[in-house]
Amino acid sequence: MTPATMRRLSRIFALPGLLLAAAISTGSATAQNLFEPVIKVNDQAVTRYEIEQRARMLTLFRAPGNPAQLAREQLIEDRLKLDAADAAGLVLEEPDIEAGMEEFAARADLTAEELIRALEGAGVAEQTFRAFVRSGVTWRELIRARFIPRISVSESDLERARDAVSGQSGVRVLMSEIILPVTTPAQAEAAQARAARLSEIDTVAEFSSAARQYSASGTRNRGGRLDWMPITQLPASLRPIVLGLAPGEVSDPLSTGNAIALFQLREIEETEVPEPEYEAIEYAAYYIDGGRSEQALARAARVRAEVDTCDDLYGVAKDQPPEVLDRGARKPEEIPTDIAFELSKLDPGEISTTLTRAQGETLVLLMLCGRTAALDGEGPTDEDLTNFIRNQRLDSFGEGYLEQLRAEARIVEKE
């Protein structure tokens, strides 16, 4: 599987994306017990083979969390979802599954055939992917059929949504961060295990201490503490995660490309001054060979001392290959997640040297040039807002229904 395909596969699990690079060691099962049932869900079995296959696929997708544990949880839920669909008389036809596979693959800019070929090249059977999609599509249709009649969106619902997106009030957050670098599979496995432990922290002091010890971010000497930040300055995919935290709570581990990130919410407040959404972010990335070596960091420090604006980087990159400097203005949704988050912490003219590329071999000197606020009147339509509210409520109903199914089920797991 080529690196380009891997990068495209990793888009599939974009939380609106924030991703987690995960590594897995599933062990080698012997031929005798490969198809041994290791989980019973009511009268249905989940085999060791299914778990290993799902875990391998989730690893390729860089799904959040521990792949082996996540595979077990997903396969249990798959059985519950399909049982519920059968009980409701819902059976999808093969064209529906094929359409779901195409839709899923399109998230990585691939066709279903291309994605299947890539997965098979990495040891994941087509049937594993097909079963994964079948469960998801079936559950989506079941939830729509079961709960859409119960959902109505009132004018007051729309009014609140319009106020939220039109800047009638602002929200700003005070956060801390821990950034764990990930450049190799071995490092990914260790970072994932550490991130899982750190996500259990529940005090600001303990998180601050961990940031000083483990974080690769420039905020480590401040205990990972960030300044007050408008929520609109964060990448769109990170906003619901941060807003879903209570003060003192730590996020689940999240991937930002070449690192695993954890965020702790310290405070949140509503402001009377509306914060703008941004139409474009202009930034420059200057690439330095050597990763986070002393020589590369020293070179970055010299560049930092020499430049005041993004234009100054043209002089720094003079007589070097053109690919060492990348400058441009992009829509927020077009910016890679790790770069977008680093830029959210910067004012124009400020520099970050937290990120790397090429498996840690290249240091990224990132400079924010400026932000262009979106013009008024370009927000979502009432139809967009209605669909958003309806989908949120469907998700909530679906989660509650799944918890009910789990509570009523007989689930027996082997060690």
Image (cartoon, rainbow, N blue to C red):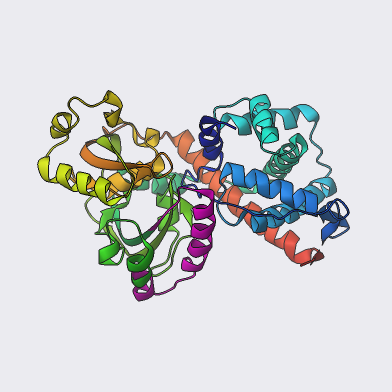
Q: Nearer the viewer, residue 296 or 164?
A: 296
Image side of residue 341 versus residue 398, left or right? left
Q: Nearer the viewer, residue 375 or 279?
A: 279
Q: Residue at x 27, y 25 (%)?
A: 321
Q: Residue at x 49, y 47 (%)?
A: 19
Report whether residue 165 is seen.
Answer: no
Rendered-image quadrant of the N terminus: top right
Question: Main SS of the magenta segment?
Answer: helix
Pinpoint residue 262: horizontal percent, then vertical percent. Answer: 42, 59
Name above or below for residue 67 compared with residue 123. Answer: below
Rendered-image quadrant of the C terminus: bottom right
Please give the count of numbered marks on the rendered protein.
0
Image side of residue 171 versus residue 382, left or right? left
Q: Nearer the viewer, residue 108 or 406?
A: 108
Pinpoint residue 386: horizontal percent, then vertical percent. Answer: 50, 40
Asked whether 204 falls inside the magenta stretch, the response is yes
Q: Quadrant of residue 288?
A: top left
Q: Residue at x 40, y 42 (%)?
A: 337
Q: Quadrant of residue 364?
A: top left
Report whether residue 222 is seen.
Answer: yes
Asked whether 66 falls inside the magenta stretch, the response is no
Report the magenta residues as a range.
179-208
Image side of residue 10 versus residue 70, left or right? left
Pinpoint residue 40: horizontal percent, then vertical percent. Answer: 83, 60
Name above or below for residue 349 compared with residue 80. Answer: above
Image side of residue 15 versus residue 39, left or right? left
Pinpoint residue 333: horizontal percent, then vertical percent. Answer: 39, 36
